């Protein structure tokens, strides 16, 4: 295997390190060292539930390396209450705009709950589940499962949310 790791302004002590699911390095002693920010927003589900939309939005905008269009901001604001409803009562971690290793794509949301990674792709305003969108959600899940070390031991489940679609039976591939 060949890996390219780039450290920018990071001091790594000489001891064994591994990356956790949040993109931080974890030493054997359990001390976290900032390595690479894989998501634009990361919090426990409980913290997310309590956070104001504007605080989450500010974190996402501040973490973006690009100009954030109004349509993107609107999409995020629509997704927050949907995520709060879906994750109500669950314990775990939530990552928004999670960068897929090697691919450079961003997954809208990744929730880690009880050893399961829920890969959530939103299609805001979509009134049907298109084949390309289903493939995108599935591909994101496969990329995370096979190219993100922290996801290897997890069950990975892709979820596509078309916000304006009529009720639809679950599709298993």
Image (cartoon, rainbow, N blue to C red):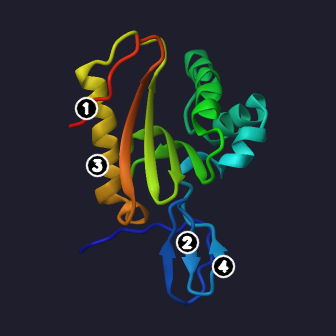
Q: On screen, 23 above or below 29?
A: above
- For this view, does 13 lie left or right of residue 123? right
Mark 4 to mark 1: distance in Å?
A: 38 Å
What residue is pinned by disc 1? 135
The reply to whether the C-beta atoms of the residues labelled 1 and 2 are less than 8 Å apart is no
Give the label, 2 or 3, closer to the camera.
3
Give the label, 1 or 2, closer to the camera.
1
What residue is pinned by disc 4? 31
The reply to whether the C-beta atoms of the residues labelled 4 and 2 are less than 8 Å apart is no
Mark 4 to mark 3: distance in Å?
A: 30 Å
Classify residue 29 by image quadrant: bottom right
In this view, which residue lies farthest toward the bottom?
Answer: 14
Residue 142 marker: 3
- Find residue 129 and report its horizontal and vertical position in percent: 32, 18
Q: On screen, 130 above or below 8?
A: above
Q: 55 or 112: nearer the eye?
A: 112
Give the label, 4 or 1, closer to the camera.
1
Q: Residue at x 36, y 40 (%)?
A: 158
Give the label, 4 or 3, closer to the camera.
3
Among numbered discs 3 and 1, the one appearing first in the sequence: 1
What residue is pinned by disc 2? 25
């Amino acid at each position: 295997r060949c890996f390219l790791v780039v450290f920018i302004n990071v001091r790594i002590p000489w001891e064994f390190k591994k990356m956790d699911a949040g993109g931080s390095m974890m030493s054997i002693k359990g001390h976290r060292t900032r390595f690479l920010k894989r998501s634009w927003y990361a919090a426990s589900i409980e913290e997310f539930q309590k956070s104001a939309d504007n605080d989450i939005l500010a974190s996402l905008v501040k973490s973006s390396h690009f100009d954030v269009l109004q349509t993107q901001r609107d999409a995020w604001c629509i997704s927050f209450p949907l995520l709060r409803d879906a994750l109500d009562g669950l314990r775990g971690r939530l990552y928004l705009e999670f960068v897929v290793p090697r691919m450079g794509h961003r997954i809208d949301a990744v929730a880690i709950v009880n050893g399961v990674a829920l890969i959530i792709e939103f299609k805001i305003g979509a009134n049907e589940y298109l084949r390309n969108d289903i493939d995108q959600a599935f591909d994101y899940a496969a990329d995370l499962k096979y190219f993100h070390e922290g996801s290897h031991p997890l069950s990975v489940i892709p979820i596509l949310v078309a916000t304006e679609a009529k009720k639809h039976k679950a599709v298993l591939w």
